[in-house]
Image: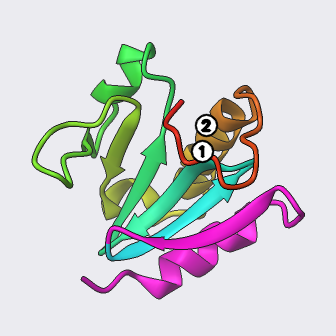
Amino acid sequence: MAYDEALADRVRGLLAAGDELTERKMFGGIGFMLRGHMCVGVIGEDLVARVDPEDVEVTRLPHARAFTFTGRPMSGFLFVGPEATSSDDGLRAWVERCSAYCASLPPKAPGDSRRR
């Protein structure tokens, strides 16, 4: 599955470059990793958002739906449709939400792929 490269470029422009930010091909798209944690990604035209799994309100935001890439919903991840990310402000709000959540997590050690 191809991913929206223009959306990925817009996400790149919003994330602060540095040693703690890396990119990884995943799920047929691209993931942006912050301190070793998946932060946001792009699959097709959708943003993949890493959110606090305890924040049930975020799941009710317009154009957000469960991340069910494997057929089962993954707690703490959402698909966000292009209607919510087409504007710069809309995309910025999602990227900031995801970045803030990932920044609250302890950094992963290199090579640590365990979910947290």
Residue displayed at 36% across by 81% down: 3
What residue would you read off at disc 1?
93
Which contiguous range is marked in magenta?
A: 1-27
What residue is shown at x 39% (from left), y 53% (from top)?
84
**As drawn, is 115 to the left or to the right of 2?**
right
- 81 and 89: which is toward the camera: 81
Q: On the image, which quarter does residue 28 sit in?
A: bottom left
Task: Determine which residue is flagged by label 2.
Answer: 97
Mark 2 element type: helix
Q: Where the C terminus falls, by quadrant?
A: top right
x and y, in percent, of residue 108 in the image:
72, 41
SS at circle 1? helix
Q: Residue furthest right?
A: 18
Using the image, determine if residue 72 lies above or below residue 45: above
Residue beneath the point at 71% across and 66% down: 22
- Tell me the kind of residue under disc 1: Ala
Residue 11 in the image, given as x and y percentages of width and height: 61, 67
* The N terminus - image quarter: bottom left
Q: How dense is the environment of label 1, judged by Cα within 10 Å: few (below 14), some, or many (20 and up)? A: few
- Colour scheme of the rendered structure: rainbow
Q: Are marks 1 and 2 in contact (CB under 8 Å)?
A: yes
Q: Is residue 42 magenta?
A: no
Give the residue drawn at x 51%, y 85%.
Answer: 6
| Number of numbered labels in the structure image | 2
Is 2 placed left or right of 114 in the picture? left
Marks 1 and 2, how far apart at CA: 6 Å
Residue 58 image point, x, y percent:
40, 26
The image quarter in which residue 109 lies: top right
